[in-house]
Image: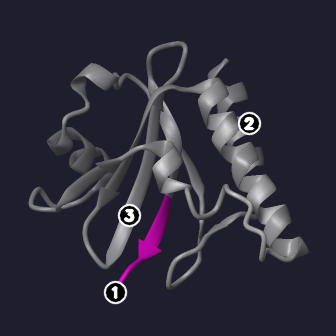
Amino acid sequence: MTNEIIAKLKQAADNLLMPSESEYPFEVFYWTGESQESLTNQKLLQLTGHPPETSIETVELDYFFRNCAQEKEWHDETQKENVSKFQSLVKTLQENLTNIQVYRLGAINIDVYIVGATPSGDLAGISTKLVET
């Protein structure tokens, strides 16, 4: 079941780049034996290899993808295609994970972890980077 979820996430994130001042791909992660109840900010920093003083901001999934997953009148065909891919990615996350949270770690060079619980109770999701100056 878990491998299936990982495969679905990889497929949905394939060839997508997160737009910011630099564009980064998405990577799928799976943290076995970790549950949402025990995912404190400190634990998240440990799991991701960040120093304990790293700042963490939590945002909603829809808010995080607000500029990527909504079609605008001025979009060209390529942009519309990307919107559709991002909508599919969000849908795949929502269909396979529960209690999804988006964590933004750090400032300027921001590591993003979109984390949710699998049916087996482990944690999985996708990560990417943002550059905001």
- Left or right of 76 in this view: 130: left
The quadrant in which residue 5 appears is top right
Quadrant of the image containing the N terminus = top right
For label 2, the SS is helix
Above or below, 49 relative to 79? above
Could you tell me which residue is drawn at 64 percent across and 62 percent down?
68
The part of the chain drawn in magenta is 128-133
Q: Amino acid at mark 2?
A: Lys
Furthest residue toward top = 120
Q: Residues within 10 Å of mark 2 (few under 14, many from 20)?
A: some
- Cα–Cα span, label 1 and label 2: 33 Å
Q: Nearer the viewer, mark 3 or mark 1?
A: 1
Sequence order check, earlier mark of 3 and 1: 3
Report the residue marked by disc 3: 111
Question: Considering only order in the chain, which callout, 2 or 1, is on the residue closer to the N terminus?
Answer: 2
For the residues marked 2 and 3, what is the alpha-carbon distance in whole angstroms? 22 Å
Q: Which residue occupies 21% across, 39% down?
A: 43
Q: Are marks 1 and 2 in contact (CB under 8 Å)?
A: no
**Disc number at residue 8?**
2
Residue 17 sits above or below residue 34 on the image: below
Q: Please say if 20 is above or below 10.
A: below
Q: Are marks 3 and 1 in contact (CB under 8 Å)?
A: no
Q: Please name whichever residue, 42 or 87, is drawn nearer the observer in this view of the structure.
A: 87
Secondary structure state at the residue bearing disc 1: loop
The image quarter in which residue 132 lies: bottom left
Image-based side of 1 in relation to 109, left or right: right
The three-letter amino acid code for the residue at tag 1 is: Thr
To which residue does mark 1 refer?
Answer: 133
Q: Main secondary structure of the magenta part?
A: strand
117 and 63: which one is in front? 63
